[in-house]
Image (tube, grey):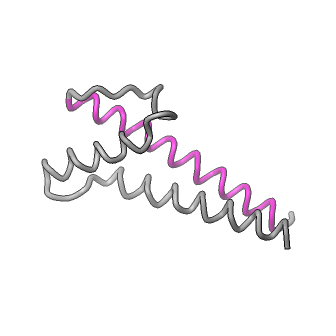
Amino acid sequence: MELMNVLAFLAVVCALVAGGFLIRIAIELRARGLDAHPVKVRWMLFSYLNEYRRVTAEETGRAGPLYSVCSIAGALAALFLIAAILVAVL
């Protein structure tokens, strides 16, 4: 496989992992009594992520574990996508 295809595949996998964890974050917010719906994750992803970080920081003093995994997976997805585009162009 070409390098571009591998990088694009890794970007898609990381984006799916981030999406899965965002759905889990929405479920955790609902369990805490906040208005969050797993179907709306697509439109409310940054607000759900910030709300989860705020709520877990109030409870434990640190951001919850889902926040870190979701943030890292999203950043890696963006990084792999940019790398795939650069490899395709260059």
- Asked if 34 appears above or below 47 in the picture, the reply is above
Of residue 41 and residue 13, the one placed in the foreground of this image is: 41
- Residue 69 in percent (x, y) is at 42, 56
- From the viewer's perspective, is 88 left or right of 17? right
Q: Which quadrant holds the C terminus? A: bottom right
- Residue 87 in percent (x, y) is at 80, 70
Of residue 79 and residue 5, the one placed in the foreground of this image is: 79
- From the viewer's perspective, is 81 left or right of 55? right
Among the 4 quarters of the image, the one containing residue 33: top left
Rendered residue at 36%/45% (across/down): 49
Rendered residue at 47%/25% (across/down): 39
Residue extent of the magenta highlight: 3-32
User: Mostly what secondary structure, the magenta segment?
Assistant: helix
The tally of labels here is 0
Rendered residue at 33%/28% (across/down): 36
- Asked if 40 appears above or below 2 in the picture, the reply is above
- From the viewer's perspective, is 13 left or right of 50? right
Rendered residue at 65%/56% (across/down): 11
- Residue 88 in percent (x, y) is at 84, 65
